[in-house]
Amino acid sequence: MAQIREIKKRMIAVRTIQRITKTMQMIATAKFTASLAWTKASRPYTDRIRQLVSEVSAAAGDVEHPLLRAVGDSGRVLILVVGSDRGLCGTYNSNILRMSARFVKEQIASGKQVDIFAAGKKPVSFFRFSKMAVLETISFGDKPTFDEVQQLAERLMDAFKAGQYSSIHVASTRFVSNSRQTPEVVQLLPMAMPTAAGAATSSASYEFSPSAAELVSQLLPRAVRVSLFQAFNDAVVSENVMRMVAMKAATDNASDLGRTLKRNYNRARQTKITTELTEIISGAAALA
């Protein structure tokens, strides 16, 4: 009897968990659909800005700009780690956090000082647990706006131009497709100027007004802002799709476990009924 009650309690608990994970899956699906639309909407603009930088820089030749090279060698590196505020999203946080920790250790081993900016509660908890100091905590929520990211980008560019850092990197998850999200550490500053060979080739000749060098000086800060905004958008959509997949797997596992528990419950109940019938028949036979 005790075994039947225990199995029944587990069945109730599994059904409750299944309802919760199913609801979380539906919420994650809705957020993924919305965030995917934002990411797809911003990606053409990001790609076009980068293409313009390539084309104009190829025509400008050697360009001098504060964002293209560090002021001296400060020996300090900044890494912005983009994670999530919540868990239950599979390996989303663990992948990028392991890569970020490995990058920090490599930089320290090379004799550099590393400052960490953490976007999200999970990166903050991870670095504190790993005894790595977090210089600043950033939170943009589920829908980062361009104005918020632009303010952060301006601060990073100002710190780089002032010579506080020799390089600035962004650790985030790049969204490739629904089934593929790639964690990566990308150098944001100094920007790598595309070469003429790598720029888009065209048979047409261009006349620039203002000059190509002036255009590059205007495009570079904008490219930094847009690239950082795209990194945040990719991180959000990657988080949502991985949470959706994780919750679907949890729901399926709860369903399988529920069927197993129901089968065990029926077997235990049938065994109990059979035992009671055997006792009744044995008792009646003894009285005959």
Image (cartoon, rainbow, N blue to C red):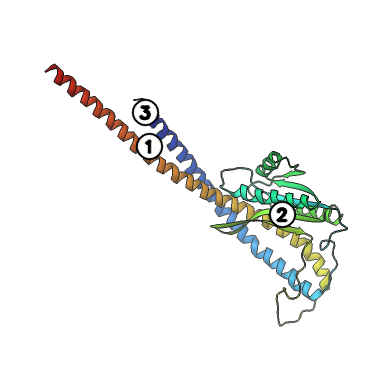
Nearest to viewer (mark 1 / mark 2)? 1
- Asked where in the image residue 279 lies, by quadrant, the reply is top left
Reply above or below: 270 against 54: above
Tag 3 residue: 3
In the image, what residue type sits under mark 3?
Gln
SS for dot 1: helix
Label at residue 221 = none
Q: Residue furthest top?
A: 287
- Asked where in the image residue 133 lies, by quadrant, the reply is top right
The quadrant in which the C terminus is found is: top left
Density class for disc 1 (Cα within 10 Å; few <14, some 14-19, many ≥20) is: some
Give x and y (percent) for residue 267: 30, 35
The quadrant in which the N terminus is found is: top left
Give x and y (percent) for residue 79: 74, 51
Density class for disc 3 (Cα within 10 Å; few <14, some 14-19, many ≥20) is: few
Q: Which residue is rendered at x = 72% and y = 82% of the image?
A: 204
CB under 8 Å between discs 1 and 2: no
SS for dot 3: helix
Tag 1 residue: 261
Give x and y (percent) for residue 70: 84, 59
Q: Is residue 209 visible?
A: no
Inter-mark Cα distance, 2 to 3: 54 Å
SS for dot 2: strand
Reply above or below: 236 against 177: above
Label at residue 170 = 2
Report the side of 4 relative to 58 (left or right): left
Q: Which residue is rendered at x = 78% and y = 47% of the image?
A: 115
Q: Residue furthest front?
A: 109
Density class for disc 2 (Cα within 10 Å; few <14, some 14-19, many ≥20) is: many
* Residue closest to the eye, 170 or 236: 170
Reply above or below: 206 against 260: below
